[in-house]
Image (tube, grey):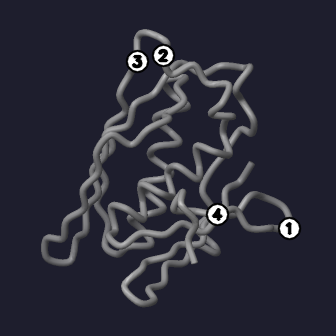
Amino acid sequence: MPDKKGFRYVSHTADVAFIAYGVTPAELISNSLYAMFGIMYDAKKLDTSMSPRRSIRLSVSANDMEELLWASLQKALSLSAARFLFPYRVVSSTSSRRGKKISFRAVMDAVEKSEAAALFEVKGVSRYSLKITESNGVLSSKVVLDV
């Protein structure tokens, strides 16, 4: 059962793993983003009142949900690293399906990276064990992050 956050961390032999939950694809991916952010920095040490706040916009399309989740997390990771930002809030997110393609769009608030808040450098999102399942109308994803 999911906790209030929409995700939980699980043990993994070498890297960091989490299971995220959502009723919709957009909620599942958003909760997966929050789980990944929680590995990158300590939110309690992040000064979100800092100016200027920045936005990171994601727009990803894929052929299936697992590819969409992987691409969304990887793109968020790449954009935050390239811009030296810590995304801390998903302001909006939507998903849609057109034919065989499924898309995800999100806007995230972010602040400049802070050494004081940094925890782990997430190098990538592993594809090898990424899995999405559905049970009783709730989607769940297991994701392993390379740190």
The answer to the question of whether label 2 and label 3 lie on touching residues, with beta carbons closer than 8 A, is no
In the drawing, does residue 41 fall left or right of residue 72?
A: right
What is the number of the mark on residue 49? 2
The percent position of residue 111, horizontal first and vertical second, equals: 49, 22
The structure residue drawn at horizontal position 38% and vertical position 21%, both measured from the top left corner, is 54
Name the amino acid type tagged 1. Thr
Quadrant housing residue 45: top right
Closer to the eye: label 2 or 3: 2
The percent position of residue 91, horizontal first and vertical second, equals: 33, 40
Residue that carries the numbered disc 3 in the rendered image: 53
**Helix or strand or loop: what does disc 4 sit on?**
strand
What is the number of the mark on residue 68? none
What is the number of the mark on residue 8? 4
Q: Residues within 10 Å of mark 2 (few under 14, many from 20)?
A: few
Label 2 to label 1: alpha-carbon separation = 37 Å
Name the amino acid type tagged 3. Arg
The residue at the far left in this view is 98
What is the number of the mark on residue 13? 1
Name the amino acid type tagged 2. Ser
Name the amino acid type tagged 4. Arg
The structure residue drawn at horizontal position 36% and vertical position 85%, both measured from the top left corner, is 137
Closer to the eye: label 4 or 3: 4
Closer to the eye: label 1 or 3: 3
Q: Residues within 10 Å of mark 3 (few under 14, many from 20)?
A: few
The answer to the question of whether label 2 and label 4 lie on touching residues, with beta carbons closer than 8 A, is no
Give the camera-side residue of 88 and 95.
88
Label 2 to label 4: alpha-carbon separation = 27 Å
The answer to the question of whether label 1 and label 3 lie on touching residues, with beta carbons closer than 8 A, is no
Mark 2 or 1 closer to N-term? 1
Label 1 to label 4: alpha-carbon separation = 16 Å
